[in-house]
Amino acid sequence: MSEAEEQAFLQAVQSDPEFERLFEDYRMIWNVSETIYPNREPIVDVNAQWAQFEHMTREAKSPKVVKLSPRFWLTRVAAVVVLILSAVFVYQQLNRDAFETGLVYATNASDETLYSLTDGSNVYVGTESKLEVEDVYNRENRRTRLHGNAFFVVKPDKDRVFEVVTDHLVTRVKGTTFLIRTSDHSTTVGVRTGVVEVLVGNQTEILTAGQSILVSADGGMIKRSVLEENDVLALLDETTHFENVQLKSILNHLKTHLNLIVQAPEAMMSNTYTMDIEGLNTKQILEVLQLLTKSSIEQKGEIYILKQ
């Protein structure tokens, strides 16, 4: 193995208890096989010796039966198994860490922001947080990486899962709403609607609506609890900035969190806009909407209607 592969292999041994157990089992087989022929030459290059054996059998002048002792086969099988296990786990470890960043959504210390992703999913990103979106997002996958806090409203897609990678776990869904909070010490995942799959090492935890899980940095502690709805509302209610968000999502947010009901023609709903409503009253918010959408506003009771 190269130096990088060896480091990844050692990291896998240290972080994955099941892999460590398997590795120790096969190392024991290897060590036992070494004692079968104490006076034989040590195996320096398994691949070379195996190739030599195959060459010998192919070049034999006359057909013959090659009889090998069970001990010979045990040695070779143990060697091959260890090599295969090492290669597979190193590949998995390196592949798991591979992430080609495309777009990056980052917030400062006073900005909770709603972003729309290219597949129609929405993400409320908390203060001092960063969401990285893979460069092949919505083409080959729907994979993101989160540092900080965010609430995800995932558009359903039966063919492609939506993934959120953190330093401590991977969250996978097909269409639901859930909260993730990360720190240097742990990651918490809480499900508001639907079902979420949380991958911690080689362990899988299934969460349904109202459930939450906390995973420590070393994966040593997995604690289940109830989702704190106030944690979700605190993030959503304080969101005042919308970055390239579909009008449908903006109006839904205003209705749910500001009790401001605004309607618009269906043809306008998929248009995206960027706006900031921090510190604005109802009249000012309506004026901003009117300016952005190039519309007029008609009021019917407590309902405001955008018209182009």
Image (cartoon, rainbow, N blue to C red):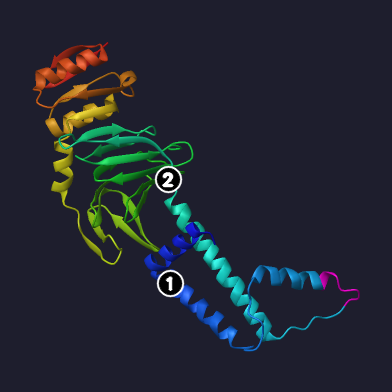
Q: Locate the C terminus and report the quarter of the image it occupies.
A: top left
Q: Main secondary structure of the magenta part?
A: loop
Q: Residue at coordinates 29% horizontally, 28% vertically from top-left?
A: 245
Q: Is residue 90 above or below residue 79?
A: above
Horizontal relation, residue 124 to residue 206: left or right: left
Total labels: the figure holds: 2
Where, by quadrant of the figure, is residue 145 drawn? top left
Give coordinates of residue 294: x percent, y percent: 25, 11
Give coordinates of residue 116: x percent, y percent: 31, 32
Q: Amino acid at mark 2?
A: Phe
Q: Locate the N terminus and report the quarter of the image it occupies.
A: bottom right
Horizontal relation, residue 162 to residue 178: left or right: right
Q: Upstream in the sequence, badge 2 or badge 1?
A: 1
C-alpha span from label 2 to label 1: 25 Å
Give coordinates of residue 26: x percent, y percent: 52, 77
Where, by quadrant of the figure, is residue 70 drawn? bottom right
Residue topped by disc 1: 20
Nearer-the-camera pick, 258 or 101: 101
* Residue 62 on the magenta segment: yes
Q: Which mark is residue 99?
A: 2
Q: Is residue 49 above or below residue 264?
A: below
Crowding at mark 2 (Cα within 10 Å: few <14, some 14-19, many 20+)? some
Q: Residue at coordinates 75% horizontally, 73% vertically from top-left?
A: 53
Horizontal relation, residue 50 to residue 246: left or right: right
Q: Amino acid at mark 1?
A: Glu
Residue 166 in sight in this render:
yes
Q: Which mark is residue 166?
A: none
The stretch of residues the image draws in magenta is 57-63
